Amino acid sequence: MYRPPTLLDPLSFALGFLAGTLFWFLIGRIRGLLAEMRQQAQERREQEELQRIQSLRARYLRHVARRAQGMHLAAPLFPLEEIVLPPRLLAPPPHAWPGEMPPAMDTVETTLPYLPWWPELGTTFGAPPLSVHSLLFTSSPIALLAPTGYGKTVALAYLALLLAQEDESLEEKRGTLPLLFHVSELPLPFEETDFRFELLADALKEQCPDLNISELIALIQSAVAEGKAVFLLDGYDELPPEKQQEVSQFLRALRRAVPRLQIITTVSPEQVDGLLSVGFHALALQSWERWRSREFVRRWGELWARQVATEVWEGVTLPSVDPLLIASWLEGSLEGLSPLELTLKVWGAFAGDMGGLDVRHALAAHLRRLMPPEVPIAAAETLALQSLAALQPYFEQKQARQWLREFEPPEVEATASEEVSQKKKGKKQKQPARPSLSVIDKFVAGGLLQSRTGGRLTFLHPGLMHFLAAHGLSAYGMQESLAAQPEWSGKWGTLTYLVTESEETALLGALLQEDAPPLYRQRFLLGRTLRLAPPKSAWRKFLAQLGKIFQDESLPCAQRAEAMLALALSRDPGAPTLFRYYLGSASADETLCLAALGSGLVRDEKAVQALISLFLQHSSDKVRTAAALALVNIGSSEALLALARALLQGDETVRRIAAEALANDPLEGHATLRDGLSMEDVMLRRAVVYGLARIQEPWAVTLLQQAQMQDDHWIVRNAATAVLEQKTDVRRRLPRPLRPPSETDWLLKFAARKGMGIAPGSPATEILLQVVREGEEEERASALLYLRNASSDAVFSTLYQVLYDPASPLRESVYRLLWEMAWAGEKLPHPQKYGLRA
C-alpha cells in the first residue's frame, strides 16, 4: 500500500543545519589558523635565517677587523686604530669634460705640478686631499700609488677596519662588505676561463677557520649582487712584471664576472704591468710631512707611556723617559723619511735599542727584535737575496728551506733527509720524539716571515727584505746583478739601501745604460734612491745630471719638477745653493716657481729674503704663490711675519695667496686665520675665508658656516658659501670609467663635424688623434684619456709633437700620459724616430 513521504522533522533539520554550519565554520577557522601558523612558521624561518646571516656577517667582520688591526709594523705593541694617522690621498686635478663645468681650483693647486709618483710635492705644500673611504664612491677600480714603505698596506687595512666596524664616516656606504686579500692568497697562475668565488675558498678558510665557507661565499655573492662589497687586494706593488701580469689576468676575470664589485689595490712607481689595461686608475697616497710626523711621535709617546713602558719584558722593567724629551731628540732627524723608516726610528728611540739616529740603525734594531737569537743575520740576508734573485717576493716553505740548508742545525737536516728517504721508499714516516724547529719555522715564530695560504711565505714588510738583500749583495760583491733585473719595487727598494754602503759606480753606469728621452725614467728612479746616500758618496755625482734637467727650460714643467724633487729630497748640500741662484736670476716664471718650491722643500732660511721679494713684487700669481708656500714651509719667524703683514696690508690677490699659504701651518698659520675672521677689514675676512677652505678640520668648517650665516658683509658671506660648496664637491675629482667611444657624445659630435662615424666596439684611435690635433682644448684633453692603452707610431708621433711644443697647453697632460704608458711596461720610442731633437 502506498504511503506518502513524511515531512522532515523540524528539530532534526535544525540540528543538522546547525551541525553542518558549525562544521564548516570550524573548518574555515582551522584553515585560517593553519594558514596563519604556516605564515608564522615561514616568518620564524626567515627571521632565523636573517639572524643566521647577520651572525655570520658579524663573525666575518670580526675576522676582518682582527686582521686589519694587525696589518702594520707596530702591531705587537698597538692595534691599528690606536696608532694610525688616517691615510689621505692626493686629489687629482679636476678634468674639464666638454660641456661640463669643472670644479674650481685654488691658487695653490694651480701652482703645483701634479706628480702622483712624487707625492712629497703635493703633500708638503697642501694640495687638496681625499679621504681613503671616498674611494668607495667611485665605480672605477683604484690603484693606491706610493713608493715602498709609504703606508699602502695600512691604507687598505684602515679602510677595511672602517668597513668592518661600520664607521659613521662611511655615510651611505656603511654596510659594504670588505673582502681583504694579499696577492699571495690568490689562485695563481690564474688558468680558469671564468671567475668564481669558490676559487678563493682556501684563502677564506685560512682567514676564517671557524666559519662555514660555503655559507660565507653565499654571503659574499649576495653582497656583491647588491653592489655592497669592495675587494681590497694588498701586495700587487711588491711583484715583478711577470707576476703582475698573472694578477692582472685574475682581476680582469674578476671584473668581467662581477662588474659591480669595487676593487682597490696597491701599486708602486716602478712598474705596473697589465693593470691599466684592466681599467684601473692610480691615485697617489700622501706622504708624511713634518706636522704629521710630529703628530705620530706624540701619539706614539702617549701610547708607549700608557701601554708599553709600564710592562715588564723578560723580567726587565723598561726605564721611564719623558716622551717630550725623546720627541725633541728626534725632531731634526724625521724629515725625508718614509712612514716605515720613521716608525722604526721612533720605536728604536723609545725602546733605547737603536744605537744611532741613522735609518740603517733603526732597521737593524728592528731586525734584532725579530731574529731568533741562535740564528745568524746572514741567514735572513741569504733568504732575502735569494727571494730578490728569483723575483719571488712570496715563496713556498719547501723552497725557502732549500735556500737556507747551510744554516739548518744538523738534527733538522738529518730529519729532513730521513723524511725524503722514507717518502721515496713508501714507508710511513716516524714521528720524532722531540722535533726541532727549522730556521724558517723560527723566522715565522719570531715574526720576520708571515705564513700565507697554501704554505706560502712573505717577509713581514718588503722594506725589510730590501734592506737585508742590500746587505747580501754588498757582502757577496753582487751589486751589478741588480742592473739586469726588470723594473720592480724589489730592485729599486734594494738599491735605496745599497747606496748607503756601496760605492759600486759600475752599477750606476749599468742602470743608466738604457736611459733615454723623452722621460729619462731611470734617472728619476735612481734619484729617489739617493736620499739615504752618505754625503760624500760617489753615487751623489749623478745629481749633476738631474741639475741639468732642472735648468733646461725647454723641458716640460713636470719633468723639471721631478729633477727638483730628486735634488731636494736627496738632502745634498748643493741643492739649496742651486735653488737660491735661480731665485735671484731673471729666469722664466716656471723656473722661479720650481726654485721657490725647492727652497721650501729643503727649508732654506738663507732664501727667505729672496722669497719675500718674489712674493711681494713679482707680477705672476703662480710665482707669488710658490714663494708664499715656500715661506710657510720654512717656517722661520721672518717668513711667517712677512706673510702676516701681507695678509693685513696687501692687495686683494696678495691677501688671498697669504691666507691660502698660512693654511699649511697648523700652529701660527691657523691661529692667524682664526683671529683674522674677527677683524673689521672686509677684504681681510674674505681672504681668510679662502684660507680656512684649505684646512681639513671640523673647526674650520664650523667657522666657514658661521661666516656664511652671520658675517655682516655680503662679500664674505658669498665667499664662504662658494668654498663650502666646493668642499662638498670634492668627489667629482674621483676617476670615473670611460664610456666607449661609440657612446661618447662629445666625440660623436666631433666625428659628425668631420663627416666620420664610430662603429660600436671600435677604439676610434684615428678620430681621437684627429681630436688631439684639431679639436677644442677640452676635447683634446679628454681625447688623451682614451689613448692610455693605445701604442702605435701614429699615436707616439702625435703625442711627441705636443710634448715638444713649448706653447701647447696639453704639454703637461701628454707628459703624464707618456709616463703612465711607460709605467705600464710600454717601451717608448726615441723622439729622433719622428724627426724631433730631444
Image (cartoon, grey):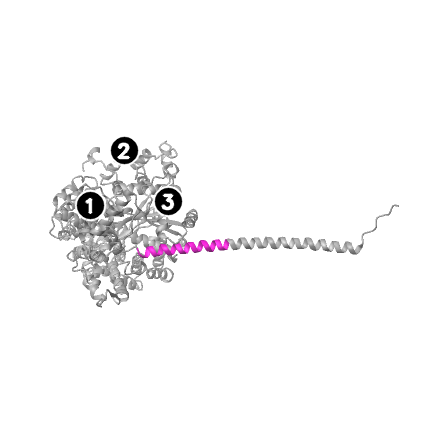
Residue 199 has which mark?
3
833 horizontally vs 275: left or right: left
First reached walking from the N terminus: tag 3 or tag 1: 3
Disc 3 versus disc 2: nearer the observer: 3
Give percent across and percent down for residue 422: 27, 45
Disc 3 versus disc 1: nearer the observer: 3
Look at mark 2 in the image and give the residue it sits on.
794
First reached walking from the N terminus: tag 2 or tag 1: 1
First reached walking from the N terminus: tag 3 or tag 2: 3
Asked if residue 580 is among those painted magenta in the image, a careful observer would answer no
89 horizontally vs 388: left or right: right
Snapshot quadrant of residue 782? top left
Snapshot quadrant of residue 343? bottom left
Look at mark 1 in the image and give the residue it sits on.
524
- Magenta stretch: give its range: 46-70
Give the amino acid type for the residue marked by disc 1 in the picture. Answer: Phe
Is 203 rendered above or below residue 765?
below
Give the amino acid type for the residue marked by disc 3 in the picture. Answer: Leu
Give the amino acid type for the residue marked by disc 2 in the picture. Answer: Ala
Disc 2 versus disc 1: nearer the observer: 1
**Predominant SS of the magenta segment:** helix
